Amino acid sequence: MRTSEKPAGRAPANAERPGSAGALSGPASRKLPVPPRERKPALAALAVLLILGGALATTLLVLRSGDRVSAIQIVQQVGSGQRIPATAMREVQIADTGVDFVPYAQHRSIAEGENHALVTLLPGTLLTRQMVVSTSRELGPGKAQVGLSLKPGQTPGTLIRGDRVQIIHVPGRGATAQGEVLAQNALVHQVGEGRASGQITVIVDSSVAPEIVAYASNGEIAVAELPGAR
């Protein structure tokens, strides 16, 4: 007896075939959606401003460094209250930083006029207007210049113009009186050299000048240097 085989049924029309576009592989089917990148225009604008600001500052510094002015530099020490001689000044070129330096064009008027150092000027100092006074406060009214001739032991050997000293009365031998400070902060105006090394001129108050002169004539005066009072 003959049997006939039934043909296999057709697959449904909506069934997806392997390899077709509609079929997703395993890893691809697990990808998460990526959010769109957020733009920050404010940060971008700030970065641009910072870059421009830095460039502008650099340009200004370069331009500023090219501004040079002629100033006065002190080349030898000038004591407080002393006149500033022309030999103590020289011309230097410095950057214009806004500091009130005295222009070198005024060096002759500084040397020839009634100008004095308000403070002790050391070599290398750049002269400013605040360091100069038109009249000496030390040589003004109420002051006197007193010459002293001192022996070794009565004066330090390191005194120079512009130093500050105490002037002390030292009683002679056999005297019962104690030493007395006659001038607390006198200015050394001149110092002798060589054989005259013991001769100095000091500026003191005119009220004590006669007493100092009297004691000095008897050799009863000594001076003590005040290094911190320059």
Image (cartoon, helix red, strand yellow):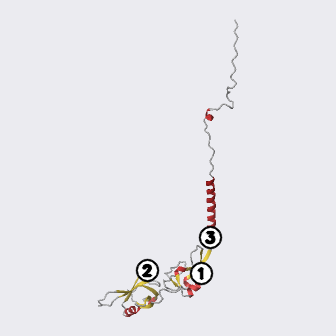
Q: Which residue is mark 3?
A: 64
The residue carrying pointer 1 sits among few (fewer than 14), some (14 to 19) or many (20 or more) residues within 10 Å by Cα, namely some
Residue projecting furthest to the top: 1
Q: Is residue 37 left or right of residue 118?
A: right
Rounded to the nearest angstrom, the CA distance separating label 1 from label 3 is 21 Å
User: Residue at image x 45%, y 86%?
Assistant: 188
For this rendering, which residue is in front, 155 or 145?
145
- Please report whichever mark, 1 or 3, sits nearer to the chain's N-terminal start: 3
Q: Which residue is mark 2?
A: 229
Disc 1 + disc 3, Cβ < 8 Å: no
- Please report whichever mark, 2 or 3, sits nearer to the chain's N-terminal start: 3
Badge number at residue 104: 1
Rounded to the nearest angstrom, the CA distance separating label 1 from label 2 is 29 Å
* Quarter in which the N terminus is drawn: top right
Rounded to the nearest angstrom, the CA distance separating label 2 from label 3 is 39 Å
Disc 1 + disc 2, Cβ < 8 Å: no
Q: Position of residue 136 (x, y in %)?
A: 50, 86
Q: Quadrant of residue 23?
A: top right
Q: Nearer the viewer, mark 1 or mark 3?
A: 3
Q: Which residue type carries mark 2?
A: Ala
* Quarter in which the C terminus is drawn: bottom left
- As helix, strand or loop, the secondary structure at mark 3 comes to helix
> Does residue 212 appear in the picture of this structure?
yes
Badge number at residue 135: none
Q: Which residue type carries mark 1?
A: Tyr
Q: Is residue 63 above or below residue 31?
A: below
Q: Position of residue 143 (x, y in %)?
A: 45, 89
Disc 2 + disc 3, Cβ < 8 Å: no
Q: Which residue type carries mark 3?
A: Arg
Q: Quadrant of residue 93?
A: bottom right
